[in-house]
Amino acid sequence: DAGVIQSPRHEVTEMGQEVTLRCKPISGHDYLFWYRQTMMRGLELLIYFNNNVPIDDSGMPEDRFSAKMPNASFSTLKIQPSEPRDSAVYFCASSPNSGSAQETQYFGPGTRLLVL
Amino acid sequence: GESVGLHLPTLSVQEGDNSIINCAYSNSASDYFIWYKQESGKGPQFIIDIRSNMDKRQGQRVTVLLNKTVKHLSLQIAATQPGDSAVYFCAEANYGQNFVFGPGTRLSVLP
């Protein structure tokens, strides 16, 4: 298995532009997580899905952030409009179904976002 | 909410020595803990986990110790190698809740 796949690996954009990050989880995993990592705040959970349904989005910082999972093999995290403070590394992770979200998570390589 | 708290140390060890990375957690209801390793430019990688009904678990060259009385978790790496240089995160969760990650500890292995 190729593991969790994220694209793009790097994104540089200007303030106000829309940014879309993409994730393909490990096949057969029922949970998908989006995290943001910064030096100041560390690793923060933004949102997670179970069987394509958003379960907890309390970590999404504001309405500019949205996430979708149209099918079991694809998810997007969108920022519109982007701001410089959104600059971070965004990780997608997936985990198998054990009846809860409490299971080992497998992380993708991350997308490094820089908003100028 | 409660969260895993760490002073963020940078731990430097000589190659071949044992490393001990510590983590204090605050949520007494947490019953599952994981250690992750993150190398530069990569995502966190699972190392070892432990559930609250255990106080010790061993893997290959790694051991996790859990002290629920003082809410302390540690990761021991035996015979530390240059490839062990990374940032190490502990994470806690309780059933039905999501993981909360600590800020991490940087391990530097000296030749």
Image (spheres, helix red, strand yellow):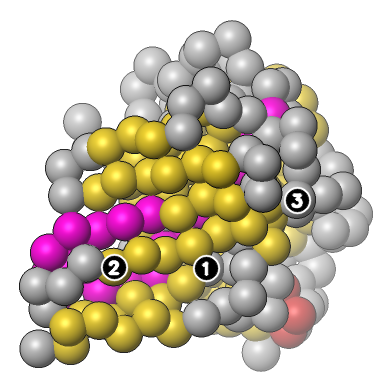
For the record, the magenta segment spans B75-94
Label 2 chain ID:
B
Specify which label sits upstream in the sequence, 2 or 1.
Answer: 2
Residue for point 32% across, 71% down: B86
**How far apart are labels 3 and 2 at the CA level?**
23 Å
Is residue B93 located in the magenta-colored stretch of the structure? yes
Which chain letter matches label 3? B
Residue A86 screen position, x and y as percent: 71, 73
Percent x, y for residue A11? 50, 73
Q: Earlier in the sequence, mark 3 or mark 2?
A: 2
Q: Quadrant of the N terminus of chain A?
A: top left
Q: Which residue sits at x=69%, y=34%?
A: B30
| Residue B91 spot, x, y in % from top left | 57, 48
Kindly indicate whether the residues beneath marks 3 and 2 are on one polypeptide chain.
yes
The Cα–Cα distance between marks 2 and 1, rounded to whole angstroms, is 15 Å
Residue at numbered disc 1: B104
Q: Amino acid at mark 3?
A: Ser
Which residue in the rendered view is the most extreme toward the front?
A: B69
